[in-house]
Amino acid sequence: MQKVYVLDSSVLLHDPNALFQFQDNDVVIPYVVLEEIESKKRLPENVGRAAREAIRHLDRLRNNGQLSQGVFLPNGGKIRIELNHYSNEILPANSNFALADNRILAVSLNLGREEERTVILVTKDIAMRVKADALGILTEDYYNDKVALPSIMDEILILPLGDSEVDALYQNKYIPLQVPLMPNRCVKAVLTDDCILPLVSSPDGKRLVYQTEKSRASWDIRPKNTEQSWAMELLNNPEIKLVNLMGPAGTGKTLLALASGLEQTVHDELYIRMLCARPIVPFGKDIGFLPGEKDQKVRPYMQPIYDNLEYLLRPRREKERERGGDSIVDSAIDLLIKKRQLEIEVLTYIRGRSIPNQFMIIDEAQNLSAHEIKTIITRAGEGTKIVLCGDPDQIDHPYLDKESNGLAYVASRLNGQSFYGQVRLIHGERSELATRAARLL
């Protein structure tokens, strides 16, 4: 039997295409939801963009008939605007009907009493789902953009190798495969003496590639575990245009990406510039407006990138000072910025840009939505490589979770593509304190 789905404003502000995601069921939008969306349409951020897109969808559907009477959707269902008929007695005493949530709950209750079909309230608001459940209203989260990542062990292929294959691997730096594998897949080769050798399948899936310890090093940074070895192989391979590094705090995601980017930009000159960016999502309460120019305003948000860059550049800066005395006045970071080999940017201004021949690092990518991730990746011009770093378990964005963030969305949609590779790091290398805290707290 067809169902009736009542959409909360949080669903449309999260995904304006949600109107078309309920197959042949009926979609009901309370009038108060339109008022809420209309109040958000002038916001400059993604909420405003989603509100405007949802309104445009409804305006196009209005050409097919009167929305209050119901209009057929392309997938066979119907959509209609509910004019919020309710009575004061339907909700608990002293309920404030000036609140939009209470009016939406009242509409859902009334529809449940009138309809012979199942009525379900769909909302991203957890508190509203709790209130709806207390009132006996069937309620669901919006699941269309949620993805379930497989376990870490399912992504790793364990492959035993004989002595002859190992000899060929050391000699040629690769061995051919009779049965092709998924492109850029992480392979744990087990030797006859039970040693582990980290390998990665080639972008065409026909070879297993091995890099020596020396060739895997970037900017004097060497991998400390098997997962970091896989990450270095993907980062240093120019054929892989998009790398996704996922893992908890302290596993080396940002440090490895910056080391590889510096090596390929400054030394190898494969890219004209390394571009680093993070979403402006504060942890905890925001401190408000910041004084100064743009660079001064975003410096607190970009400080983790500066910390890693200072760690990477300090040894080389000290060596150059020893050779040249006190001739170096500016810091190494400022020097790279002046030479336009390094750019630290906020994602707010990335829309509309075309970024060719650059090594892009997007840190804390778990705080980006699927739409934002798509916007960033489609900025890449010819010769650009993008590295996404993040931990799906550390999300500060109020409307995203472990299953609906952009990092997981990319891992679900692009895994298996020849231009894409991903590694899920698990071993903390920052310090013993950070590793134990990430595991126990």
Image (spheres, rainbow, N blue to C red):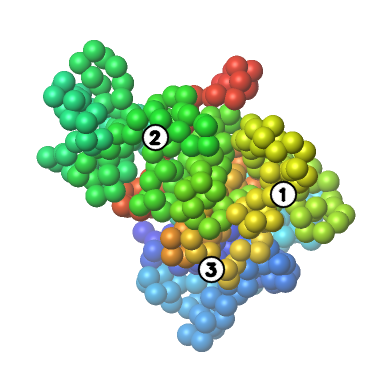
Circle 3: element type: loop
Image disc number at residue 354? 3
* The C terminus - image quarter: top right
Q: Residues within 10 Å of mark 3 (few under 14, many from 20)?
A: few
Circle 3 or circle 1, nearest the eye: 1
Circle 1: element type: helix
Circle 2: element type: helix
Q: Residues within 10 Å of mark 1 (few under 14, many from 20)?
A: few
Q: Residue 54: give x, y in percent of width and height.
A: 58, 71
Mark positioned earlier in the residue sequence (3 or 1): 1
Q: For the residues marked 1 and 2, what is the alpha-carbon distance in whole angstroms?
A: 28 Å
Residue 38's place in the image compared with 127, above or below, is: below
Q: What amino acid is at disc 3?
A: Ser
Determine which quarter of the picture holds residue 121.
Answer: bottom right
Q: Mark 2 points at which residue?
A: 215
Task: Say whether residue 103 is left or right of residue 188.
Answer: right
Mark positioned earlier in the residue sequence (1 or 2): 2
Q: Mark 1 points at which residue?
A: 334
The answer to whether residue 133 is visible is no
Q: Which residue is drawn at 39% across and 50% down?
A: 238
Q: For the residues marked 3 and 2, what is the alpha-carbon distance in whole angstroms?
A: 32 Å
